[in-house]
Image (cartoon, rainbow, N blue to C red):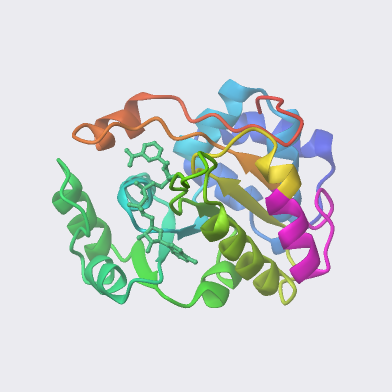
Amino acid sequence: MIVSPWEAQDKLLVGVQTRRSLIHLDASDSGKSLLKLWLSRIVSYSAFHKIWEFSVSLSISLFGLGYVGSVSAACFAHMGHKVTGVDISKTKVEMLDSGRSPIIEARMDELVAQANKSCRLHATTDSIAAVLASDVSFVCVGTPSLKSGKLDLSHVEHVSREIGTALKQKKAFHTVVLRSTVLPGTTETLMIPAIESTSEKKHGTDFAVCYNPEFMREGSAVGDFFSRPTRFWDRKARST
Ligand SMILES: NC(=O)c1ccc[n+]([C@@H]2O[C@H](COP(=O)([O-])OP(=O)(O)OC[C@H]3O[C@@H](n4cnc5c(N)ncnc54)[C@H](O)[C@@H]3O)[C@@H](O)[C@H]2O)c1
């Protein structure tokens, strides 16, 4: 099923009401990919947020299972999404995949155990398989400060290249969301070129890149995740 933007928007307004109706609309890969592209471009921020939170069950791959990544993975799974966490640390992957939180944080033990029981949260070191099995990838790897005062973006670049390598094999549209702390312009100067060169695909046509800044505080990270609106910016800094 291929729907036009206006059809998608009409059905979307109906779909906001219940989870089932949107999932029904979301039946084919092509319809699903187009709908997500249009959602991120034409639907107002508040509608997109409601849909994201309550109506669409997505398959998510999430890179970096540190503080931000683990909390995001557990909270997205709690919201009903299917999440695959990816990390280079086998210890963190094994912990999350067996239902144990890799970090000490209020409510995390409970959320991770529940998500594991309901089979909505897995973890792997296989980045390619995780991207191929998902609709959207969140990037939450570390960006430590260098002695020069600049941010070390090597992990973001490495993950971007891995996502691009996977996208080379993927036919469906894919959305990439950067959550790591970076300076404005990083998606355009680093992330998009890295994904385009390894995937041989075009940003805006085959995949989209958004920025979703993370504001969670250690100690109240789960509460912060659920209590604050999730904002996405596209590369022209338009709130979507
Ligand atoms: N910790 C916070 O409270 C907080 C709050 C807001 C924003 N941030 C920002 O969020 C980002 C992540 O922060 P954090 O505290 O979770 O970092 P972290 O150092 O705790 O975790 C980063 C994780 O990324 C993993 N990683 C590195 N390279 C990888 C790769 N190629 N593939 C998969 N995983 C890889 C590391 O093994 C590690 O588990 C940073 O940019 C940070 O500035 C952090």
Quarter of the rendering occupied by the C terminus = top right
Q: Is residue 178 above or below residue 227?
A: below
Q: Is 200 one of the magenta-colored residues?
A: yes
Residue 30 placement (x, y as % from top left):
76, 60
Quarter of the rendering occupied by the N terminus = bottom right
Residue 201 placement (x, y as % from top left):
83, 64
Residue 8 placement (x, y as % from top left):
75, 39
Residue displayed at 73% across by 36% down: 235
Q: Is 34 one of the magenta-colored residues?
A: no
Residue placed most toward the observer, 147 or 189: 147
Q: Which residues are magenta?
A: 190-208
Give the left or right position of residue 218, taking residue 167 as reference. left
Residue placed most toward the observer, 142 or 41: 142
Give the left or right position of residue 211, taking residue 111 as reference. right
Whether residue 207 can be seen here = no
Residue 160 placement (x, y as % from top left):
63, 60
Whether residue 142 can be seen here = yes
Q: Is residue 119 above or below residue 32?
A: below
Q: Is residue 183 above or below residue 203?
A: above
Residue 202 position by quadrant: bottom right
Residue displayed at 74% across by 46% down: 189
Give the left or right position of residue 231, taking residue 234 as reference. left
